[in-house]
Each structure stands twice: as C-alpha cells, then as structure tokens.
Amino acid sequence: MMSVEASSPSEPILKSFTLEDEQLENSASDEVKKAFNKPSSADMLFFYERLLPFRHIFQWLNHSPKPTQDFVKREFAFEYSSGAYQRYNSFPTQVDFKKAVVTANPTRFEVGAVYTVNPKERKNLPKSAMKPLSKELVFDIDLTDYDEIRTCCSGTDICVKCWKFIQVASQIIELALREDFGFKHLIWVFSGRRGAHCWVSDSRARQLDEVGRRSIVEYLDILGSKQNKMGKKSFNLKKPFHPHVERSFGVMAKHFTEIVLQEQDPWYTQPSDDKKGKNWEQVEELLSYLPDKTLQQELRLKWQNSSKISTSKDKWDDINVVAQKVLKSQNQAAYLKEAKKDIVVYYLYPRLDIEVSKQVIHLLKSPFCVHPGTGNVCVPFNPKKNLSSNTEDDEYGFNPTNSPNLRQLQNEIEIYDTKRVNRESSQPLDESDSELDNNNLRIADYEKTSLKPYVDYFGKFVQELLKDEMSESKRNREDDPLDF
C-alpha cells in the first residue's frame, strides 16, 4: 500500500491570499480572457463568410438596392494583422465587395468618401481628377477622453458605470442633430472596445463640405478641443446658456446625481488621504469653479478638517449649506447657481473627437467589423432601448460588456447546428428547441446567434433610409424641367 506523507503543520496546504494576490489573479484572468477573445485569421474568415451582413452594408452605402455611384466610387480601406493598411479599394457590386473582403481577410475594413472617379483607378488619372464628393457625417466618442473625470476605469478599460457617459452623450447629440439640424437617419455603432460612433446618413448631411461639417461639430463641441486640457482655465460658457446648451443641461441634470455624485464619486475623501493626492486635486478642481473666494476657503477648511469620510454627494450638498452662511447678496447666489450648472456640463457634456467629423475624406471603421483586440462585434445599437434578450441590460439601453463577441457567436452557431442535427435524427428535444427552423426553412447563420437583433435593427434603419432616398429621387425627377 502506498503511504501518504502528512503535511507539516508549519506548511499549510491552502495558501492565504491577500487582497493584492486576488487583484493579481483577477488581472491575470482578464489577460487570459482578452487573449482568448482576440480573433485569429481563421476566426475572421469565418465571420466574413458566414456572419457579416454584406447586403445591409452595401445598401446602406449605396442608397439603392442596385449599384450606384455612391458605392462604385466609394473608398474602402483594409487593415491587416501585419500592420499593413491598404487604401483606395472600390467595388462595382455587392458580390465583388464580399468576394474582395473574404479574399483579403483583413482584421477590419473602413468606409471612406465617394469620389469623382473610381478610387482604384486613381493612378491612371491626373491627381486633380480625384476629389471627394460626399460621405456620411460622423461623430466619435471615446471614453479615454473621460479619463480625467471617470474613477471606475481608465485607458482601454470600460464598465457599465462609465458607459453611462456615452449614454448621456448620445442623447444630447441626437437631440441636437434631429431638432437643430433636422437630420433623420442616425445610427449609433459600438466601436468594439471603449467608444461609440454616430453615422448621419441623410443626403443633406452626406453632401456637406468641410466648412459645413466644421460648423456643425463646433456648434456641438462646447467643451473645446481635447488637445487643450479641459479644466477651469479653458472652460468658459457664455451666459445665459445657448438654447442647445440649456436643453442639454436638462438631460445632464437628470443623470448627474447617479452618474457623477454616486457612481463615479470623484471628490471622495477620507481623513487619512494625502492632501496633495489625486482625490484632493479633484476637490480643488471643484472649488475652482466656485466664484466666491471666501466660499472656497470655508469649504476647503470644512473638508480638510473633517474626521469622517466625505463623499461627492456630501460635498455637493455642503456647497449650498455653507453658501447660505457666507454669501451676502442675491447676485452672489445667482453666480453660484450658474457655477454649479457649469460643473454639471463639464462632467457630463459629450467629449467629441472633432477631427473625425470635420474631414470628408476621413475613414471610419464600418459597422459590424470585429475589433481586433477584443473580438467584439461593432454592432449598431439603440441608446434608449435594449436590443438584446438579456433583460438585465434594460436599464442601460446598450451594455458594451455584454455585446456580441465573435467567439460567443461561433459557439452559438455550433450549439444551434448541433440541436438541429439532434432534431433531424429524431432525438428528444426540450421545449426551447421547438422553434428551431420552423417549416424546415433555411435561415442565415446570424439568425442563429445573439447578433440577430442588431442586424435586424440595422436592416430596418437601412430600409427607412432607402425609402426616403427613393422619395427624394422621385421629387427631383418631377422638379426637373428637362425630364419628360
């Protein structure tokens, strides 16, 4: 019989884990997960051959079921895992488009402008012959631009808490584009990691030159260019607020307590904190907005001398309490009210990458691409309504941490196809299988997966766009005096 040597009492079998050990373990686990989700060349080929909705993308960019100049003379760029970047691709039909993407198998492809000539024929023509004619008006929001105010994550990391910044931003931008500029055909697309893109496909938006695009983005970009550090020194809103800013403030005010004061809690301090540390830097930033020096000093002393934990909500409430004792005039109270509104705007107003919006020739990753670093599909989403079957995401509208991932989609297809084989071999199935392939009809692979609601949502958007495009084309023909 084999003998088993007893463990020495001084050598415990189970290791005692510290908080630091747990954090390292979680970090290692996250890295393993990221490496697993990163798609291979074979994964991407699978996606292009079986899942990417080429027809919807073609019709969206073509503005018609049959090929037009809007597609034939449009630039596409391919990016490869080697780092190579191939510009000026163009295709005569949807079939050629799909064939080229499948053959090239890029890590992603980007959409560019429609030109006066076919982009791939540019080398045979004078440089002056190739000029951009049109492209969708686009907006880009990246959560790294919120790093100075979000406390939950930084860099490329995101969570449902900081995604709420994009939820608020999307509401504000969409309101302005619809109500102030009259645009109708807007679609929001997850970037696949930490941001969102808004594509405006109205004919009038596509025809904008760079001056027109710049005027719209500057109208929206009230915080100023991200090249300048966004702080008190560079933040100066005219009073009274412009109607767009006042309307936007109404949206932000509804979410300020939940997102900023409670979840981000940027001004949280405790007695043991270093008074020169990051948290106190944020507190000093808060104080710098307040117009009265005496009020600033009274609040600073109150918070620095506190023997208790002080949350952002506590500090926000303290401002009014101390102000009632310090401020002597109605004008001072009015200035304070305006300052608090500025703080709300600073923390929640959209932070735009304005260069993406300004240039007609700027290329942007297409909807339904796969992010090469995460494996997440860049799905279109509705900021106000959860499209997934996960009811827990209803409060977010769209939850990026639960967005379709290529590995997940491959597994879902495998499970679906396995169940179908089981059914065809007359093996017993549970009730959830009863609706598989009703009437034995062939269905597209994306319909077997959690990608389906996003493809359907995009398809509906495209059909509405095509309907308006055809109506506009008909009106133009009727108005043409030379059209008999």
Image (cartoon, rainbow, N blue to C red):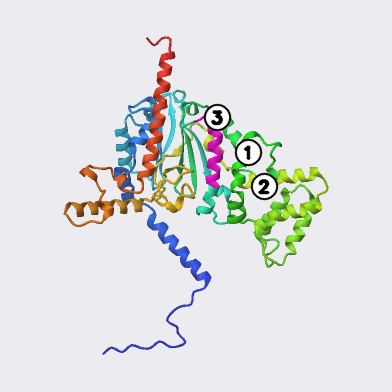
Location of mark 2 (residue): 343
Location of mark 1 (residue): 222
**Circles 1, 3 touching at the beta carbon (< 8 Å):** no
Label 1 crowd (10 A; few <14 / some 14-19 / many >=20): some
Give the Cα distance between marks 2 and 1. 13 Å
Quarter where residue 332 is shown: top right
**Which residue is pictured at 64% across the width and 46% down the height?**
344
Q: Earlier in the sequence, mark 2 or mark 1?
A: 1
**Which residue is pictured at 21% across the width and 43% down the height?**
439
**Which residue is pictured at 43% across the width and 28% down the height?**
114
Of the two numbered discs 1 and 3 in the rendering, the one whose residue sits closer to the viewer: 3
Name of the residue lying farthest toward the left:
425
x%, y% of residue 28? 45, 64
Residue 88 appears in the figure: no
Instruction: Give the secondary structure at mark 2.
Output: helix
Q: How many marks?
A: 3
**Circles 2, 1 touching at the beta carbon (< 8 Å):** no
x%, y% of residue 422? 20, 55
x%, y% of residue 360? 50, 31
What range of the chain is rendered magenta? 165-183
